[in-house]
Amino acid sequence: MSEEPKRRLVVGPFNRVEGDLEVRLEISGTSVSAAYVNSPLFRGFERILEGRDPMDALVVAPRICGICSVSQSHAAALALGGAMGVEVPRNGLLATNLMTATENVADHLTHFHLFFMPDFARPAYEGRPWFDRAAARFKAAQGSAVRAATAARAELFHVLGILGGKWPHTLTLQPGGVTRAVDARDRVRLLATIRSFRRFLEDSLFGAPLDRVLALAAAEDLERWRVSGPAGDFRLFLEIAADLDLAHLGRAHGRFLSHGAYAGPDGGHLYRRGVFADGREVLFDPDQVTEHHRFSRMAGQDRPHPPFAGSTVPDGLDETGYSWCKAPRLAGLPYETGAIARQLVDGHPLIRALVAQDGGSVRSRVVARLLELARTTDAMEAWLRAIDPAAPWCVAAEMPDTAQAVGLTEAARGALGHWLRVERGRIAGYQIIAPTTWNFSPRDLDGVPGPLEQALVGAPVQEGERTPLSVQHIVRSFDPCMVCTVH
Amino acid sequence: MRERPFSVLWLQSGGCGGCTMSLLCAESPDLMTLLETAGIRLLWHPSLSEETGAEAVGLFERILAGEEPLDVLCVEGSLLRGPNGTGRFHVLAGTGRPTIDWVRDLAAAAGTVVAVGTCAAYGGITAGGENIADACGLQYEGTRRGGALDGAFRARGGLPVVNVAGCPTHPNWVTETLMLLAENALAAEDLDVYQRPRFYADHLVHHGCPRNEYYEYKASAEKPSDLGCLMEHMGCLGTQAHADCNTRLWNGEGSCTRGGYACINCTAPDFEEPGHAFQQTPKFAGIPIGLPTDMPKAWFVALASLAKAATPERVRRNAAADRIVVAPTVRPTRKG
């Protein structure tokens, strides 16, 4: 018996992802047999941060990424705050939640309308029963839903105009709270913006009140929505997903990580912190996180690196590494992160049911993201109502000469951590592990592929395809942010 | 009327993508409406276009072969020369070729080259610290002319690189630059000394800052969330920074100083290395080292001490609070 002939395909530049991405595919017969994910841009933010005044991280870190900017800001503020031992006052927490939520919600919206759905409006799908609707709504840069979502997004960002001064790259988030107090007038103005955004979701995306989305609890509920639910882009996606069997495309390792999102003023998180694997939820221990450089073009390829002792020394001559991205591992294993991980860990019944059925897939990642869009928008109104304009927003604090702390938050696309070490009053070490570092990591010390590399195995490739559509759907289902990945 | 749409190709290199993210915040009209009604066509944009992989590379090759006319090349992000001058810190995916080489070739084919953001203009944050990536701007390295392109570079249309600097750029700095170019209404004299469009760079961030009354009396913020002027202690460079942020406003009603924090002069070359902590004002003998633009030092010192002495109680107390604790006195209006 002879082996099927293998061919190779290099795919890039991979657009409608944030930043630059190249995927090398090995194809046997009509499907992908192995994938190698390359993050082709190295800038060296960890090195840019070293030696600076620790507070400068608030200026530098957000500039890692123009789409996760507030999340980067938040992780930096948390790491600095941890090093200072400062407690953010209640209003500061609520304003921080509103700011990170605005960015995350906007990113989910952008991903669905501008990055992910336009692939279904490609000529290759002409003739499918849903094609005309997909083309009218989602043709790249032209579709009616693309335009409407862009406008809704711009208006939603008025929340960050008020709270953050601008977006991206705000300095409002500080270790001790926020620099911008919200008065009674600001509060109702912000409510108007968020309610208007909610109206957009209800009219355009879901075609139904958010409460109906929030009530989705079982796979059968979703199936009913697909068959006889309200007209809207959510239902259109479910129809496409069923036709193209997206529930069985793009399964990774089945292990999920969430740092926990939106700290409650009375403790805990709106979406709790933890790890979900093999059908169970367990606690997350950040001390178990290491980075492997085995297939990164980085010094230190022979051993795992705990982030507090991590290093970023690029090796331009290295031939064994195939990416500038390091390979983060939790207790030695790769983990997927993102909205699907947050909702799984948080115990959302629908997402638990979908993953129990089919594992993480193109469909369940997108459903989790849209469900979270509804949940978070709903929570934003509650945080605004909880604000007490008479209470403080920020407390001042001093940075000790020596300290170390980790800041853990969630960007739209998943778990983000900053590991900060301060010595003699300067930044001595600053290691960043971003969501797409987890999701798009190269192989590790044991040769185990990263989540995307695994998810691409088995993807069907049609005759003559140079940029296979199935590969595009899988890659974009993760909502990758490549500029964060390597930083 | 133009015979064909005004064509724009957008490439990204050593940056964060934030200028694109900001551009999508354009309002009244939204980005797509603005471009279409101005007759501007995006040939390809990494975040917005349908074409990926081979389809995109095919377009770049058609442009270089002269088969597809290119009016404007927009570059976002700094250009990376490292390691060791190879440019391999950013190889354009799918091509095996450093992005800096693609940019040099495409710049030669473009009617005008626009640097979108401070990274593409001068190197920006990516050139910070030891600049391990050997990042530079298109036509500048910090304040020095000459970057990825020669200091003497002129595009086919005759302009040097147009530096729409800002970290990020305001959406309408970009859209207005493109509209002016499409109308052939942006000339060399419309650019300032660092080749920034003067329509926004001839203003100072200080203009329209709502903290102006605090500035006048040197009633200063001392900690984050204070309402007072951010210049004396909090590192604010608004009196020196060239941009119209406080008259144009961001994302509706915003600006950095309205958000409660310092202007860090992000439209300027070398802003990433101010020589001090960003959020602290360096001083000599109690006087801020960076004086307001065009103000003689002796006058600043004299006026500041006089103003401090004259500070009304209301202004003094509000400056150190996170909300207005003393309202301005309401005086009876006098008629006739």
Image (cartoon, coloured by chain):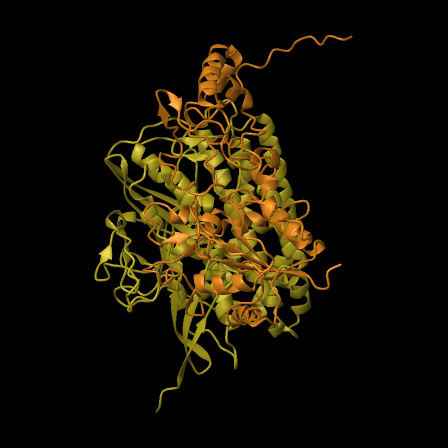
Is A299 placed above or below A307 here? below
Quadrant of the drawing holding the N terminus of chain A: bottom left
Furthest toward the bottom, the residue is A1
Report x, y in % for residue A241.
Answer: 56, 66
Q: Quadrant of residue A25?
A: bottom left
Chain the render paints yellow: A
Counting every numbered tag in the picture gives 0
Question: Residue A176 appears in which quarter of the rendering?
Answer: top left
Query: Observer-nearest residue: A467 or B307?
Result: B307
Chain displayed in orange: B
In this view of the protein, which residue sits in the foreground, B200 or B40? B200
Residue A386 location (% of width, % of height) = 52, 31
Asked if residue B300 can be seen in this view, the reply is: yes
Q: Position of residue A269 (x, y in %)?
A: 42, 41
Residue found farthest to the front = B152
User: Residue A232, image x and y in percent?
Assistant: 65, 57
Q: Residue lying furthest left in this view? A: A302
Please state which of residues A275 and A161 is positioned toward the viewer in this rendering.
A161
Residue closest to the eye, B108 or A88: B108
Q: Relative to residue A1, is residue A303 drawn left or right?
A: left
Residue at x 59% of width, y 14% of height: B328
Up-down relation of residue B220 to residue A234 (above or below): above
At 49% from the left and 77% from the top, the residue drawn is: A461
Residue at 64 percent across and 11 percent down: it is B330
Residue A269, can we see it? no
